[in-house]
Amino acid sequence: MGTAFIVPGFVFSVMFVINLLFWITGSIGGTPVPALFILLLLWFCISVPLCYIGAQIGSRRKRVEPTSKYSSIPREIPDQSILFGKPLCIASGALPFGVMSVELLFILSSLWHSEIYAMFGFIFFVFLIVLMVSAETSIVVTYVKLINEDHRWWWYAFLSPGTVGLYVFLYSLLYLFMNHTLDGMNLLSDIIVMSYMGIISVLLSVMIGSIGFLASFCFVNVIFSGLRVD
């Protein structure tokens, strides 16, 4: 049931803190309490039950098994270079971020400068490229782990493209710093802007990381499908 609570709980907690700041300062920009209560009801009365039902249905389905046999005894992993650990994951996130960086600038300008954004066809094209680059990045990282005889590729396949959220958040910090002279910008505004960007960054990381993991999972199944283990 962690799926039903971790990400939605994070989003709701951040939204509650934002609205708490609005209420403390007496701002009218906060979400009304009845609306928050309705969102809470939707979460626990619709999202959580549907997640539970989906988990029950999935548990009764046939498990997705690897296409090749594997040993039940984990193989000893040779000494790995420190560059093939966290630095590899962090550096890999720069690739999908580089694809979206220019378009992200226009999106941030539209969000926080009240400008009109009308390039929906182009952003959809960029979105598809980001998905392809993320999948390819995850596959390359997985391949690097496998040729170095490291079978612990699962989290690396998720985190290598998923770290794009870290780049998006840092880029948002830089954007906020460069545009801090906007009218009405104060500490409260900074906290609110970065809270929203934190939500966006986390959700983007989960989405892109999931795409990368699925791509790597299919890649591993394909390359090992013809392998015979005696």
Image: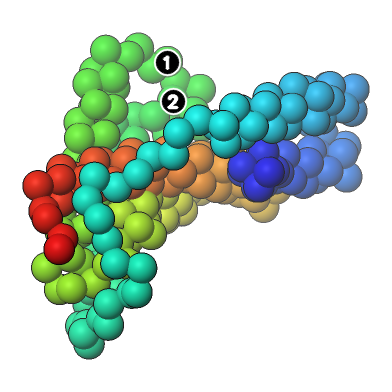
Residue drawn at (88%, 45%), measured in percent from left and top? 24
How far is mark 1 from mark 2, CA to CA? 6 Å
Q: Secondary structure at mark 1?
A: loop
Q: Is residue 81 left or right of residue 205?
A: left
Q: Kindly indicate whether the residue at mark 2 contacts the one at mark 1 (C-beta within 8 angstroms).
A: yes
The answer to which image quadrant residue 67 occupies is top left
The answer to which image quadrant residue 121 occupies is top left
Question: Residue 180 in the image: x percent, y percent?
Answer: 50, 48
- Location of residue 133 with respect to 169 vertically, above or below: above
Label 2 sits on residue: 110
Colouring style: rainbow
- Location of residue 44 with respect to 92 vertically, above or below: above
Kindly tell me whether residue 92 is visible in this rendering.
no
Give the residue type that dot 1 points to: Ile
Residue drawn at (67%, 27%), measured in percent from left and top? 53
Residue nearest the observer in this picture, 86 or 123: 86
Q: Mark 1 or mark 2, which has the lower sequence index?
A: 2
Question: Residue 221 in the image: x percent, y percent?
Answer: 21, 45
